[in-house]
Image (cartoon, grey):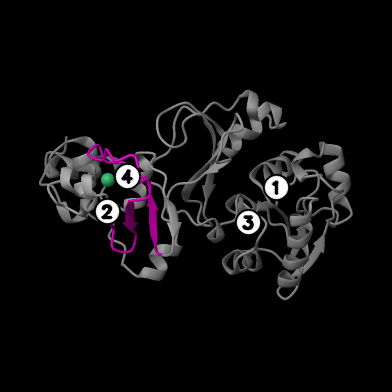
Amino acid sequence: MSAGPINFQVAKQVPIAQVLAHYGVQLHATGGELRGQCPLPEHTSRESRNSFSVNIARNLWCCQSQSCIHARDGELGGTVLDLVARLERCSIREAAVRLTEWFGEVTPVPVQATSVSQTNLPLRFQLSGLEHSHSYLEGRGITALTSRTLGIGYYGGPGMMQGRVAIPVHNEAHELVAYAGRSVEGEDPKYRFPPGFHKSQELFLLHRAKHTGDHAVIIVEGFFDAAKVWQAGHRNVVALMGSSLSDTQAGLLQKHFRQAVLMLDGDDAGRAATDAITRRLSQIMEVEAIHLKPGVQPDQLAPTEMNETLSGHLRPGRGLGR
Ligand SMILES: [Zn+2]
């Protein structure tokens, strides 16, 4: 327990998205807010599945369910202090103590609707006890060495990543900003992200690729594509975490590389994305596109196939055989 005076103002500014992530609460982003099922113990209504909303810029929450409001003595919502006090069934004072313990003394972030809603704040926690050897990873051909090095592993602990393979996502500055939670038994959704995480603001593995000194970067769609390319010895790989390229991602590529080798999925979406991204990137850098056979994804290529596929596109000595 904290011995000194409690700084309520500081505790109140812990980003609400991080507090919700701490509890494994999953919300979806709509406009400048997050919305979803109410996590409060007072919430008993089974009908209102979308009544809980969060204003990220103002760091406030509310639940519109009448019975929930009634159970909270008419309060519509509140700050992160109120939220933690209700979830933990403790006093506001105790909530402030716990928030400070969990997240440390956060430096207040200047509130600016655009920057707050688009920037991924570093996570204040790290999952521990990840299992780097797991049948799911093995099934996808990811070795324990690769998953340990990249920090990927099965998570059995509580929260939104429970029972999933957690994949850490870092920003350009090497700060952990999210975990992607991949379902391992075909459950939906395939991937879970912390509430408020913007995929479009990051490139998976950029924090590693930028240090290789390569002029060229290999761009793939998914986490496992990137892990397999990496495992085949090409450390200059990043994943878009999807099949579109945002302006922020284009800017990051331009900042760190001069040549891009696009290797997206060999399906219709991948081909359309390859054309669109080639057009976009060729304005700012040299681009080569690899067209995989129909139905083939980079993560399905054996290391030798991977190297053969890439060798024609990477100049010798720049990324091969590391
Ligand atoms: Zn509620």
**Mark 4 vs 1: CB contact within 8 A:** no
Instruction: Examine the residues drawn in magenta and state their main secondary structure.
Output: loop
The three-letter amino acid code for the residue at tag 2 is Gln
Residue marked by disc 3:
210
**Residue located beneath label 1 in the image:** 235
Q: CA distance from mark 2 to mark 3?
A: 46 Å
Determine contact: label 2, label 3, CB under 8 Å.
Answer: no
Q: Residues within 10 Å of mark 3 (few under 14, many from 20)?
A: many
Judge by depth and name the residue closer to the eye, 24 or 121. Answer: 24
The residue shown at (15%, 37%) is 90
Q: Amino acid at mark 3?
A: Lys
Q: Which residue is mark 2?
A: 64
**Residue 38's mark?**
4
Q: Earlier in the sequence, mark 1 or mark 3?
A: 3
Where residue 9 appears, as percent x and y from the top left, is 17, 56
Q: Is residue 45 magenta?
A: yes
Mark 4 residue crowding within 10 angstroms, few (<14) / some (14–19) / many (20+): many
Which quadrant of the view contains residue 4?
top left
